[in-house]
Image (cartoon, rainbow, N blue to C red):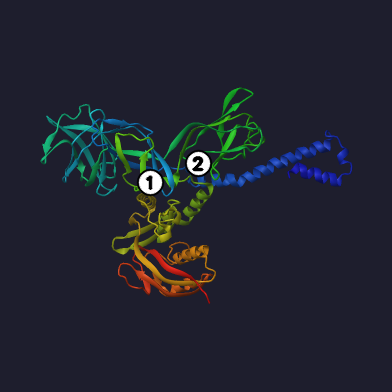
């Protein structure tokens, strides 16, 4: 009930002749005027907390973050017998099948593909030689390089050249590896193509050489051709999302996905017969009745419009609300493991197979208002600098919503903080077996976040946990046994070894069998248990106490028989 309705009800009950007063009566006009002002003021007050939630983190340097698309490298194998050079176009779509369902990736640029044959890698302290059986004839050569270990602390400046009849000729490059300090692509540009093969180190090849002109040459693990970069991002050039009705508070859902960047919105006005550009605002708090404003609501992934007082209503029309340049991704769900099943959406007989070269990483969901407020609160507590082990654990855990927990310990010998990362259960492919192993991308995300905030004299090591294989055997007796109770009891047994909430499970923890017995008996369904054993699969021994190592967590397999208690 709005203020005008409240005012009229109150007037009818307190002024006997109210219903006989004409609409133009000064008292009615004044009451309606004051009521509408009160409605507008109350509406703006309701918007105020939302406005503060959006703006307050920015005051402390914490900016709203859109979703980020995961990226990955794809290895392409050409079909046997096909010898021609082809170009894989930009925006070529790949589909990946994983436990998350079907995820789409696409190339960001065009890539030349050719039948590579064998690639030979020869390296010494001062130079690296790459021998190719075949080379592209029409496009620049592109090679994907994988260093033995990645590290920005390595200082090196390199120059590259190709072997021709007159000797080694320098070539310009576009180097994403930062002189072999990280995995990436090197593109070789030369006005002169490869002329011929030469015999070096007993092998006839086309040869490319890299030399360190300053610093120490990093060791290279492997080199690959026909590797392309793909992104989980997709862009919709133009899409009608709905029809205006002229009613207040219209809203339309956007296609599923995480919003990567702001988009534009146009509305066709039937009166002027023109398309009008509307402006995005964070809130309708300051919008006037004629303001062509819309609001994107991240929690519901919808576009919302005003009520005619705070923000203009949509003009009536059919499919007259259009968004343009809408960029979406799958956020965290795009961070797929390298063993995901990958294929071209449109098959090409010239391409035999495609597969991820490594885990996809970098995908992130859009930070909502609640996320930003939590981050602001965390920065107050930790002073934006990791000093204590608790700081490392909290900052590491907040690096990504995929991360369930980070366990930090200190190694006195070399002043190293060891951070062991585990995922939240819903991101684990084997959560039922308590395996929370992160992907390489998760480790890199945590490492990058902590490296920026650690103290200068502290080394940092971020790793995944190792797992102690444990089998639980025995019998548990319950009353009223059914499928649902059996499932709940299995979950209850596993929860004792789960490293979340208030659990005692963590690296270096000591867990006793007696504690496990008390945990079993705490279930409302359990009436008795017999011959319960905690078996270490490595030694085959039944343990009275499970002692975990500094980077170790238990991986549990249940072989417990659940039976009905008959008497």
Per the rendering, the mark at residue 284 is none
Percent from the top left, x then y, of residue 560? 42, 68
Dot 2, how many residues are within 10 Å of its Cα: few (below 14), some (14-19), or many (20+)?
few
Tell me the element at label 2.
loop
Dot 1, how many residues are within 10 Å of its Cα: few (below 14), some (14-19), or many (20+)?
many
Residue 388 appears in the figure: no
| Residue at image point 37% right, 56% down | 437
Q: Is there a contact, CB below 8 Å, between mark 1 and mark 2? A: no
Give the mark count: 2
Depth check: 158 or 17 in front?
Answer: 17
Tell me the element at label 1.
loop
Percent from the top left, x then y, of residue 339? 34, 48
Instruction: Quickly name the residue at label 1.
Output: 361
Q: Residue furthest front?
A: 566
Instruction: Please identify the quarter of the rendering in which residue 132 is found.
Output: top left
Instruction: Quickly name the residue at label 2.
Output: 256
Depth check: 69 or 137 in front?
Answer: 137
Which sits earlier in the primary sequence, circle 1 or circle 2?
2
Q: Quadrant of the N terminus?
A: top right
Depth check: 7 or 340 in front?
Answer: 340
Tell me the mark number nearer the camera, choosing from 1 and 2: 2
Query: From what the image shows, is residue 434 above or below residue 254?
Result: below
Residue 144 appears in the figure: yes
Q: Residue furthest bottom?
A: 567
Depth check: 420 or 433 in front?
Answer: 433
Instruction: Please identify the quarter of the rendering in which residue 11 is found.
Output: top right
- Residue 500 shown left or right of residue 84 in the figure: right
- Residue 195 shown left or right of residue 409 in the figure: left
Q: Residue furthest top?
A: 273
Percent from the top left, x then y, of residue 264? 52, 32
CA distance for labels 1 and 2: 20 Å
Percent from the top left, x then y, of residue 192? 20, 27
């Amino acid at each position: 009930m709005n203020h005008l309705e409240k005012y009229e009800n109150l007037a009818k009950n307190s002024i006997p002749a109210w219903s006989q007063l004409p609409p133009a009566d000064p008292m009615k006009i004044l009451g309606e005027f004051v009521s509408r002002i009160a409605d507008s003021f109350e509406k703006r007050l309701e918007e105020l907390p939302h406005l503060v939630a959006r703006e307050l983190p920015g005051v402390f340097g914490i900016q709203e973050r859109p979703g980020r698309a995961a990226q990955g490298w794809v290895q392409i194998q050409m079909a046997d017998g096909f010898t021609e050079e082809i170009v894989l176009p930009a925006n070529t779509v790949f589909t990946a099948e994983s436990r998350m369902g079907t995820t789409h990736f696409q190339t960001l640029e065009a890539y030349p593909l050719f039948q590579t044959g064998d690639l030979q890698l020869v390296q010494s302290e001062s130079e690296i030689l790459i021998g190719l059986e075949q080379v592209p004839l029409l496009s620049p050569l592109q090679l994907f390089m994988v260093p033995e270990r990645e590290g920005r602390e390595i200082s090196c400046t390199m120059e590259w050249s190709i072997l021709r009849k007159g000797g080694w000729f320098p070539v310009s490059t576009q180097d994403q590896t930062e002189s072999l300090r990280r995995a990436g692509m090197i593109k070789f540009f030369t006005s002169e193509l490869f002329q011929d093969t030469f015999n070096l180190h007993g092998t006839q090849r086309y040869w490319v050489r890299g030399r360190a002109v300053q610093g120490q040459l990093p060791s290279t693990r492997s080199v690959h051709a026909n590797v392309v970069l793909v992104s989980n991002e997709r862009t919709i050039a133009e899409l009608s999302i709905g029809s205006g009705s002229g009613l207040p508070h219209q809203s339309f859902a956007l296609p599923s996905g995480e919003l990567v960047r702001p988009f534009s919105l146009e509305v066709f006005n039937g009166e002027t017969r023109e398309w009008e550009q509307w402006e995005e605002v964070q809130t309708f708090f300051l919008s006037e009745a004629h303001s062509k404003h819309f609001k994107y609501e991240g929690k519901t992934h919808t576009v919302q419009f005003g009520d005619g007082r705070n923000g203009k209503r949509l003009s009536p029309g059919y499919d007259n609300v259009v968004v343009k340049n809408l960029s979406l991704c799958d956020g965290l769900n795009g961070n797929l493991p390298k063993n995901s099943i990958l294929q071209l959406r449109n098959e090409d007989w010239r391409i035999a197979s495609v597969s991820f070269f490594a885990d996809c990483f970098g995908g992130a969901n859009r930070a909502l208002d609640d996320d930003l407020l939590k981050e602001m609160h965390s920065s107050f507590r930790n002073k934006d600098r990791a000093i204590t082990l608790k700081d490392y654990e909290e900052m590491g855990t907040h690096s990504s919503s995929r991360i369930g927990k980070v366990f930090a310990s200190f190694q006195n010998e070399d002043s190293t903080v060891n951070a062991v990362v585990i995922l939240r259960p819903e991101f684990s492919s084997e959560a039922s077996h308590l395996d929370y192993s992160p992907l390489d991308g998760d480790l890199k995300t945590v490492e990058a976040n902590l490296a920026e905030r650690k103290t200068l004299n502290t080394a940092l090591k971020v790793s995944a946990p190792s797992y102690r294989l444990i089998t639980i055997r025995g019998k548990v007796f319950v009353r009223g046994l059914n499928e649902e109770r059996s499932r709940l009891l299995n979950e209850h047994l596993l929860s004792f070894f789960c490293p979340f909430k208030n659990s005692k499970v963590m690296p270096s923890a000591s867990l006793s069998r007696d504690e496990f017995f008390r945990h079993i008996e705490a279930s409302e369904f359990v009436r008795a248990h017999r011959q319960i054993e905690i078996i270490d699969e490595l030694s085959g021994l039944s343990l009275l106490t499970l002692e975990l190592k500094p980077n170790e967590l238990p991986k549990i397999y249940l072989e417990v028989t659940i039976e009905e208690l008959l008497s």
